[in-house]
Amino acid sequence: MENRFDDIRPYYNEEIPAAMQRIAEATSFPLLASYVFPNRSIDDVREEMRGYKTIKEFQLGVMYHANKQILKKSATEFTFSGIEYISHNTNYLFVSNHRDIMLDASLLQNVFIDNGFDTSEITFGANLMRGQVVIDVGKSNKMFKVERPGGSIKEFYRSSMHLSDYIRTTLTERHQSVWIAQRNGRTKDGVDRTDQGIIKMFGMSRSDDKIESLAELNIVPVAVSYEWEPCDILKTIELYERQQGPYIKKPGEDLNSILTGITEPKGRIHIEFCKPITRDDLLQFDNCTSGEFHKAVANLMDQRICSAYRLSPNNYIAYDLHYGKKKYINMYTSEEKKAFKERMKSLLIRYEDECDIEALADIFLGIYANPIDSKKLFE
């Protein structure tokens, strides 16, 4: 690839040996190795790491097993569907709802590996790519940097064009699939919606034909569903604080969210590949203005993702509690309702001295109840 993407691209294979040496020598390595390989000695894992020469070796040797450990320790079930929509001979732009900083994209890679597909490249926020170990693990795992919006309009336009160009080049010239979230940052309130600015960004690198510009990217919406929302209490507190005034991210907050998402119970996890966005899908919006076109495509994405979102008893319990109804009483048991209420109480009680508990409960229940409204909206 041309060196114009050196500021954001993942590592090349020739950069892997040096990255593996740095990871193996890092002070955090024993902790990381003991989590991924609990039954092996640190020295044994370190020696194996130092022998990796390619991205594929690192992904199969480490990341695949890291995901397995996460599932073993924090999930009760991991399933997927819709894989018949994708082909081994095509590269795709997977656009996913975003509930967990790391797991949405990371667990998807195991689905690819288990079904004979190549792994995809993964967007990774520049705010997260800090510290040499994080950078080395991320860039060895096909992660590429995405700058958060900020600065001048001119700078935002430049970075958006750069990202658009990188994604198109990766798909059409390097023949690698790409994963990206449907919006900037995670969904905090349980309402999965595609930012139409993302759709606009996709097309910036080819402005001659808005239909072909998106059609050649082979966009596949992806819906990831968690029985227990990753970082539910942390999201609740953030939304609560935003209601009180300007929200200021705390030092180490992103790392805490990553670790919480990885370690806390998630119950059942499901990933669904939705029907791809085809040329025929896009042609129905051919007469739209540019802004209307981006909005219509984003709405189509939302329709497929929200319809594919897999609801659990927790969603129905939260809906009935949130609205004081018994509308979905047949969708859960009294035991499931009791377990949900007890977990919610145990999480919220920690903040009773500093927050309005009723307001927190309202936000917490909304996070779980909102996917039902989204699903109904697109029925």
Image (tube, helix red, strand yellow):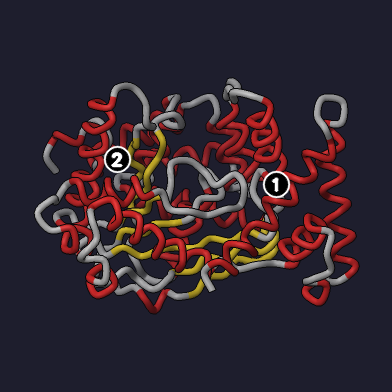
Separation of disc 2 and disc 1 at Cα? 29 Å
Q: Amino acid at mark 1?
A: Glu
Q: Quadrant of the N terminus?
A: top left
Mark 1, residue position: 264
377 to 178, vertically: above or below: below
Q: Amino acid at mark 2?
A: Pro
Could you say which is closer to the camera, residue 232 or residue 140? Answer: 232
293 to 38, vertically: above or below: below
13 to 77, vertically: above or below: above
Q: Which residue corresponds to the image point at 12% horizontal and 58% vertical from the top-left? A: 209
Could you say which is closer to the camera, residue 135 or residue 105? Answer: 105
Residue 287: name its quadrant: bottom left
Q: In the rendered view, does 184 fall on the left or right side of 31?
A: left
Query: What percent of the width, then of the height, locates residue 293?
Result: 28, 58
Q: In the rendered view, does 218 fall on the left or right side of 23?
A: left
Q: In the rendered view, does 103 fall on the left or right side of 317?
A: left
Q: Which residue corresponds to the image point at 58% horizontal and 22% vertical from the top-left? A: 248
Q: Are marks 2 and 1 in contact (CB under 8 Å)?
A: no
Query: What percent of the width, then of the height, locates residue 15?
Result: 26, 36
Q: Quadrant of the C terminus?
A: bottom right
Q: Compare marks 2 and 1 and give the one earlier in the sequence.
A: 2
Query: What percent of the width, then of the height, locates residue 282?
Result: 26, 68
Residue 237: name its quadrant: top right
Could you say which is closer to the camera, residue 326 or residue 180? Answer: 326
Mark 2, residue position: 10
Q: Residues within 10 Å of mark 2 (few under 14, many from 20)?
A: many
